[in-house]
Image (tube, rainbow, N blue to C red):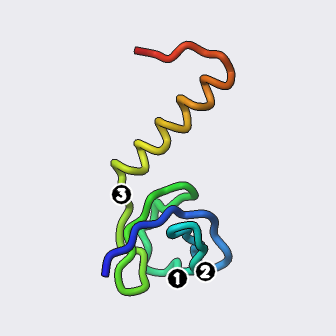
Amino acid sequence: MKQIGIVDRFEGDRVVVEIDGQMFDFPRAGAPAMLAEGMVVIIRQGRIVDVDQIETQRIEDDMRRRFERLLGKQPEL
């Protein structure tokens, strides 16, 4: 079964991922090497198997737009 989550933090050899508002630990071993906090990950059989690059970028862009609005900057077209 495939699950989608967001990397919250790293704790030693574990990756803490938020899935549907709950936190779960997964082994860091075997996870993608470029894994970072805030990335959207795909989980299968209790392991992080991939990063959803498109969804990660969408969330980053959305957060950047929100932050710029807070600062009163005009969005770039």
Q: Closest to the observer: 57 or 66? A: 66
Which mark identifies residue 27? 1
User: Is 9 left, or right, of 4 in this rendering?
Assistant: right
* Label 2 with label 1: CB-CB less than 8 Å: yes
Q: Earlier in the sequence, mark 3 or mark 2?
A: 2
Disc 3 crowd, CA 10 A, few/some/many (<14, 14-19, 20+): some
How many marks can you see?
3
Q: Which quadrant of the structure image shows residue 77?
A: top left
Q: Which quadrant of the structure image shows residue 16?
A: bottom right
Q: Compared to 76, does 11 lie above or below? A: below
Quarter that holds the N terminus:
bottom left
Which mark identifies residue 52? 3
Q: Residue at x 62, y 30 (%)?
A: 67
Residue type at numbered disc 1: Pro
Circle 3 SS class: loop
Q: Earlier in the sequence, mark 3 or mark 1?
A: 1
Q: Which quadrant of the structure image shows residue 57?
A: top left
Percent of width and height locating residue 4: 40, 67
CA separation in Å, label 3 and label 2: 22 Å
Q: Residue at x 43, y 85 (%)?
A: 46
Percent of width and height locating residue 15: 57, 74
